[in-house]
Image (cartoon, rainbow, N blue to C red):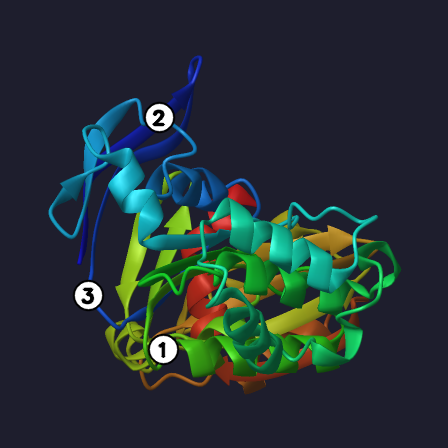
């Protein structure tokens, strides 16, 4: 349904998106993951025609975005991270205005607003000013705006950004319900959101795709690798690396964070190795203070961190 080939975007001499290739099937919920500044929003803005690519092509249902941008926009709904709402308007008046802009027929307009009110859970705030709503309700109103023309494709940029845990669950449920009938692309850096909502995950880092597949396939491709999470006080990376690297079964030691006098490292282990006892004995010989020491296996979070670590 959507074919993206060698999509590239430069801002002067900075490459924000670097030759991305994605094929998105009809009815798929695709999650675009990546750290801040990875190129997610730029990619979505090019997909929706809001930004002109520097190079590459975007084809949606046989429409080319360079030649037929309006046709593509007609079958897309787009919710940017900060929904463009008129805060002085009542919710109903705003949706009525959007329906007029989108040329929804007068006879069909009341039914469509009512349907969106039910779908997005905003019927109880229809006659309140948008500016008085919580962030969660504003996102729902923005989602109703994006859905006004019943688009085949829905593109959501950080749809749960700034929401509390209950609001995140509510928006996630709405997205899953919509996804039964539509193709959805959403960007996020919340891994649990992507894992719970998306059929497929694309991880982007520094403008490049570094992983593409279902959660299960990404975990399978990472294998059953084990690693040890270690947080120490009174220690520095050079000393820790010199003391622990010679231990059998340790493949690599990476710094994860260093703040407030604590050093957090990840110790990658060789297959079938369990060097925890030797690590403990080494630590006993130092004056390091252990704040955390536990073993984990690969999950979506560790895969994400491993693939995007260079950008942190």
Q: Residue at x 29, y 75 (%)?
A: 214
Judge left or right: residue 235 versus residue 56: right
* Separation of residues labelled 3 and 2 (CA atoms): 23 Å
- In percent of width and height, residue 38 lies at 48, 43
Which residue corresponds to mark 3?
A: 25
- In percent of width and height, residue 250 lies at 43, 70
Which residue corresponds to mark 2?
A: 52
Q: Secondary structure at mark 3?
A: loop
Judge left or right: residue 310 versus residue 287: left
* Separation of residues labelled 2 and 1 (CA atoms): 41 Å
Q: Earlier in the sequence, mark 2 or mark 1?
A: 2
Name, please, the residue furthest toward the top. 12
- In percent of width and height, residue 224 lies at 33, 82
Q: Marks 2 and 3: in contact by CB < 8 Å?
A: no
* Separation of residues labelled 3 and 1 (CA atoms): 31 Å
Which residue corresponds to mark 1?
A: 225
Name, please, the residue furthest toward the left. 62
Q: Is residue 298 visible?
A: no
Q: Residue at x 51, y 68 (%)?
A: 267
């Amino acid at each position: 349904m959507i074919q993206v080939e060698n999509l590239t975007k430069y801002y002067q001499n900075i490459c924000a998106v670097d030759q991305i290739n994605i094929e998105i099937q009809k009815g798929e919920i695709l999650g675009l993951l990546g750290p801040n500044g990875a190129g997610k929003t730029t990619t979505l803005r090019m997909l929706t025609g809001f930004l002109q690519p520097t190079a590459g092509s975007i084809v949606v249902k046989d429409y080319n975005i360079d030649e037929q941008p309006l046709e593509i926009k007609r079958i897309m709904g787009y919710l940017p991270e900060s929904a463009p709402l008129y805060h002085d308007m009542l919710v109903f008046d705003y949706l009525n205005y959007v329906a007029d802009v989108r040329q929804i027929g007068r006879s069909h307009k009341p039914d469509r607003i009512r349907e969106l009110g039910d779908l997005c859970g905003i019927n109880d705030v229809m006659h309140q000013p948008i500016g008085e709503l919580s962030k969660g309700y504003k996102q729902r109103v923005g989602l109703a705006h994006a859905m006004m023309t019943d688009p085949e494709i829905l593109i959501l940029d950080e749809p749960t950004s700034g929401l509390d845990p209950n609001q995140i669950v509510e928006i996630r449920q709405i997205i899953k319900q919509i996804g039964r009938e539509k193709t959805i692309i959403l960007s996020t850096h919340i891994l649990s959101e992507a894992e719970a909502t998306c059929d497929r995950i694309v991880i982007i880092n520094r403008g490049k795709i570094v992983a593409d597949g279902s959660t299960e396939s990404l975990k399978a491709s990472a294998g059953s690798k084990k690693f040890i999470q270690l947080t120490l006080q009174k220690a520095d990376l050079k000393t820790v690396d010199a003391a622990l690297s010679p231990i059998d079964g340790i493949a690599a030691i990476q710094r994860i964070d260093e703040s407030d006098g604590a050093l957090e490292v990840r110790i990658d282990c060789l297959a079938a190795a369990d060097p925890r006892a030797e690590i403990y004995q080494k630590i006993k010989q130092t004056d390091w203070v252990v704040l955390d020491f536990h073993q984990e296996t690969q999950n979506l979070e560790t895969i994400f961190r491993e693939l995007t670590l260079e950008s942190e």
